[in-house]
């Protein structure tokens, strides 16, 4: 099963930027749709942004206009560029195959912590 490793998180002030990276253990070319998810303690993991193999993107309303998702199949990576960060963006961020998440067979990595101070 494909594994994902997330990186790039950190502590930033409100209004700042971070660039998250997700690296897959094998080629992304066979994964039609990838997503970035986030989770805060006590809440369910939520989809933040997604991208298909045709590079169609979708975003949660809360991040629209601030976050940009992209993918590089040659490097097996999916990027989440986050600008205009807000304290409510504080969470652990994960990436995964949307299909695996939807069908309940996703294996989750450690994620990367994003903390936005006010």
Image (cartoon, helix red, strand yellow):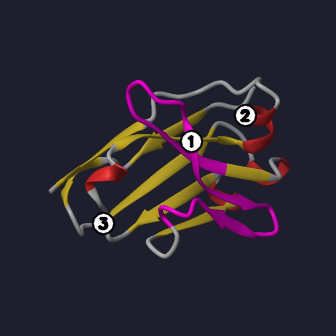
Stretch of the chain drawn in magenta: 35-63
From the viewer's perspective, tell me whether residue 100 is left or right of residue 80: right
Above or below — where is 69 with respect to 77?
A: below
- Image mark for residue 17: 3
What residue is shown at x 30% (from left), y 66% (from top)?
Answer: 17
**How far is the residue under mark 2 from the one under mark 1?**
11 Å
What is the x, y in percent for residue 118? 15, 57
Mark 2 lies on residue? 101
Q: Residues within 10 Å of mark 3 (few under 14, many from 20)?
A: some
What residue is shown at x 80% (from left), y 47% (from top)?
Answer: 31
Secondary structure under the numbered disc 1 in the rendered image: strand
What is the x, y in percent for residue 42? 41, 24
Please state which of the two labelled residues, at mark 3 or mark 1, is closer to the viewer: 1
Q: Residues within 10 Å of mark 2 (few under 14, many from 20)?
A: some
What is the x, y in percent for residue 34? 70, 50
Mark 1 lies on residue? 46
Q: Residues within 10 Å of mark 1 (few under 14, many from 20)?
A: some
């Amino acid at each position: 099963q494909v594994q994902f490793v997330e990186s790039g998180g950190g502590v930033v002030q409100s209004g700042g930027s971070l660039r998250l990276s997700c690296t897959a253990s094998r080629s992304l070319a066979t994964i039609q749709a990838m997503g970035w998810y986030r989770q805060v303690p006590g809440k369910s993991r939520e989809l933040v942004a997604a991208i298909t193999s045709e590079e169609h993107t979708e975003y949660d309303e809360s991040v629209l206009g601030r976050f940009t998702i992209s993918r590089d199949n040659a490097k097996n990576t999916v990027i989440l560029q986050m600008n205009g960060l807000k304290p409510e963006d504080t969470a652990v961020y994960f990436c995964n195959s949307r299909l695996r998440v939807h069908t309940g067979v996703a294996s989750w990595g450690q994620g990367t912590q994003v903390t936005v101070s006010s």
